[in-house]
């Protein structure tokens, strides 16, 4: 009996960004070649997000276009719901394939329960001096995963009406509304107490809101102060294998001149990576550059994924943490 060949759908955007801030086509190619070396008979389909071409280094874009035209890389249709993740899972379900990704696809656990079948999800990481290591994995459940969650049961309270004198009406009786000041006061008191508690907890009144924001402002100032000190000591981020510039020299120079470390930056969330988000920052004169916001700069404690606190298309105020002049990219934080 002929053995069925292993069919694999590769989450290209995920593997290309593993351990990096900006996706690398070279890294993706290394990962796919390493996997095929381990599984020579595997039938591999590589899928990347529609924005992948614009996020890789300028020097890799021509090679990407060639690979896309040759059918070596597939992108979802423009405007596809669920972006690349949904497209990957639909292909995998259609051909009963294994998914090669370090993502957990939490938004799709209900729609694709087979993600939890052993052997349907494989993860991979490059190990220095060793190469790519691939291993079976199971999806990680999180806030967006509803798998195995029990539906909340609603308790319906029966309406009990007691007339003056203790009589209880039966179905079909006509009730005449009776104004009761005692009942109004009884109900108003707990409602007032609840509102007071909610106001106190949410600091909805202006004086309380100001008081509540003082510790938060102090914490932000402290974080920015530390970031400024660190940036002055080491103005360039850690060196990575690929050092191709991300932004045009003129636009990046204008950004560095206009925004100082610790300064405010208006940006729009364009895409997500394994360890953060890609942000397009815009200056007052209209100059735009591509920036990066790692998850470690998006909260205390840091979120598991950037998309847990940001949404694609969000326009937010960020803080400039540091810049990498060699790669012409800025690192931002909330």
Image (cartoon, rainbow, N blue to C red):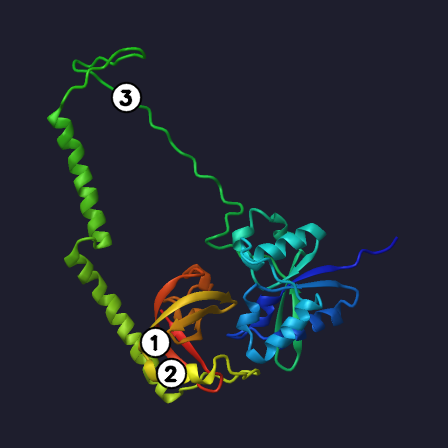
For the residues bearing labels 2 and 1, Cβ distance under 8 angstroms? yes
Dot 2: few (<14), some (14–19), or many (≥20) neighbours within 10 Å?
some
Distance between the Cα atoms at labels 1 and 3? 67 Å
Rendered-image quadrant of the C terminus: bottom left
For the image, the number of numbered tags is 3
**Label 2 residue SS:** helix
Residue 304 in picture, x, y percent from top left: 46, 63
Distance between the Cα atoms at labels 2 and 1? 10 Å
Q: Earlier in the sequence, mark 1 or mark 3?
A: 3
Residue 67: name its quadrant: bottom right
Q: Earlier in the sequence, mark 2 or mark 1?
A: 2
Distance between the Cα atoms at labels 3 and 2? 71 Å
Question: Disc 1 designates what residue?
Answer: 285
For the residues bearing labels 1 and 3, Cβ distance under 8 angstroms? no
Nearest to viewer (mark 3 / mark 2): 2
At a point 15% along the width and 30% down the height, the residue shown is 184
Residue 70: name its quadrant: bottom right
* Residue 160, disc: 3
* Residue 254, disc: 2
Q: Is residue 199 above or below residue 262?
A: above
Dot 3: few (<14), some (14–19), or many (≥20) neighbours within 10 Å?
few
Residue 1 in picture, x, y percent from top left: 88, 53
Nearest to viewer (mark 1 / mark 3): 1
Nearest to viewer (mark 2 / mark 1): 1
* Residue 309, disc: none
Residue 118 in picture, x, y percent from top left: 66, 55
Residue 324 visible? The answer is no
């Amino acid at each position: 009996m002929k053995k069925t060949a292993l069919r694999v759908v590769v989450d290209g955007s995920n593997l290309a960004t593993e351990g990096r801030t900006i996706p690398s086509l070279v890294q993706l190619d290394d990962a796919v070649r390493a996997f095929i070396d381990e599984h020579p008979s595997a039938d591999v389909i590589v899928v990347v997000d529609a924005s992948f071409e614009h996020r890789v280094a300028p020097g890799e874009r021509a090679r990407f276009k060639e690979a896309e035209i040759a059918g070596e890389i597939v992108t979802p249709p423009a405007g596809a719901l669920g972006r690349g993740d949904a497209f990957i899972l639909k292909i995998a379900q259609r051909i009963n394939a294994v998914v090669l990704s370090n993502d957990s696809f939490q938004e799709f656990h209900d729609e694709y329960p087979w993600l939890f079948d052993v052997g349907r999800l494989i993860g991979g990481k490059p190990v220095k001096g060793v190469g790519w290591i691939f291993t079976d994995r199971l999806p990680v459940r999180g806030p967006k995963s509803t798998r195995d969650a029990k539906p909340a049961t609603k308790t319906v309270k029966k309406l009990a009406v007691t007339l003056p004198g203790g009589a209880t009406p039966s179905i079909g009786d006509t009730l005449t509304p009776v104004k009761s000041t005692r009942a109004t006061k009884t109900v108003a008191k707990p409602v007032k107490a609840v509102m007071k508690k909610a106001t106190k907890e949410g600091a909805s009144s202006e004086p309380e809101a100001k008081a509540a924001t003082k510790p938060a402002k102090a914490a932000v100032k402290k974080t920015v102060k530390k970031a400024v000190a660190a940036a002055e000591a080491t103005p360039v981020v850690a060196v990575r294998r690929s050092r191709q510039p991300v932004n045009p020299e003129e636009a990046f120079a204008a950004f560095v001149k206009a925004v100082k470390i610790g300064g405010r930056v208006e940006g729009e969330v364009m895409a997500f990576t394994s360890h953060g988000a890609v942000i397009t920052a815009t200056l007052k004169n209209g100059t735009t550059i591509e920036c990066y916001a790692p998850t470690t700069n998006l909260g205390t404690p840091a979120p598991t994924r950037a998309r847990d606190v940001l949404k694609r298309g969000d326009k937010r105020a960020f803080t400039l943490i540091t810049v990498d002049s060699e790669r012409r990219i800025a690192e931002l934080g909330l």
